[in-house]
Structure formats: structure tokens, C-alpha cells
Amino acid sequence: FRTTMHKLGQTFVELEGDAARVESYAICHHVTAEPDPDRPGATRDVADQVMGIRYLDRFERRAGQWRIARRQ
């Protein structure tokens, strides 16, 4: 991708001691480019994708730090 952006939105956390189930929603924007045959050395955008995604994560606290243990 030439550029990407992920904007994190609504997040739900269910804490269970040193573990947590987390559900997060995001909007992703990806732009793909390819060489421009009319302008040597330049590129042109050929795809502009915007999508909604959902992360289903399990976080675990290890040595006092929260880390993603599993992502779906």
C-alpha cells in the first residue's frame, strides 16, 4: 500500500484478573499505487479501499504489562 490508516472506534473490555476479552471496531483506509507510465519515476493511485473491521482480542498481563495474546 502507498498509505494506510486505521481509525479505532468503539471498544468493549471484559476484565478477568490478568486476562481480558476485548472487542474493537475500526475503519481502515488503504491506498494502492503503481508506477505511472506517463511520468517516469512517479506513481498513480489505482485503488482506494475503505472498510469496517472488528478485532476480537484476548489480552494477558505479563510482568505487569498488557499484551495481545490472541487476535481474531
Image (tube, helix red, strand yellow):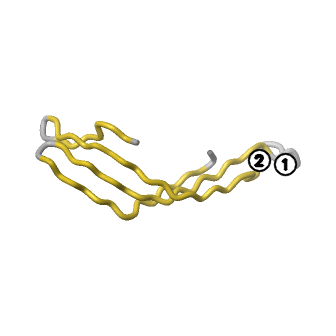
**Element marked by disc 2:** loop
Whether residue 38 is situated above or below residue 62 in the rendered picture: below
Instruction: Indicate the position of residue 51 as horizontal and vertical percent values.
Output: 56, 57
Residue drawn at x 76%, y 51% as measured from the top left = 44
Residue 64 located left or right of residue 71? left
Q: Residues within 10 Å of mark 1 (few under 14, many from 20)?
A: few
Which residue lies under the disc numbered 1? 39
Q: Are marks 1 and 2 in contact (CB under 8 Å)?
A: yes
Q: Amino acid at mark 2?
A: Ala
Residue drawn at x 16%, y 36% as measured from the top left = 62
Dividing the picture into quadrants, the one containing residue 14 is bottom left
Q: Quadrant of the N terminus?
A: top right
Instruction: Indicate the position of residue 46 as horizontal and vertical percent values.
Output: 75, 51
Residue drawn at x 18%, y 43% as measured from the top left = 19
Front position in the image: 6 or 69: 69
Which residue lies under the disc numbered 2? 42
Front position in the image: 71 or 30: 71
Instruction: Indicate the position of residue 7 as horizontal and vertical percent values.
Output: 45, 60
Residue 58 located left or right of residue 39? left
**Element marked by disc 1:** loop
Q: Residues within 10 Å of mark 2 (few under 14, many from 20)?
A: few
Dividing the picture into quadrants, the one containing residue 41 is top right
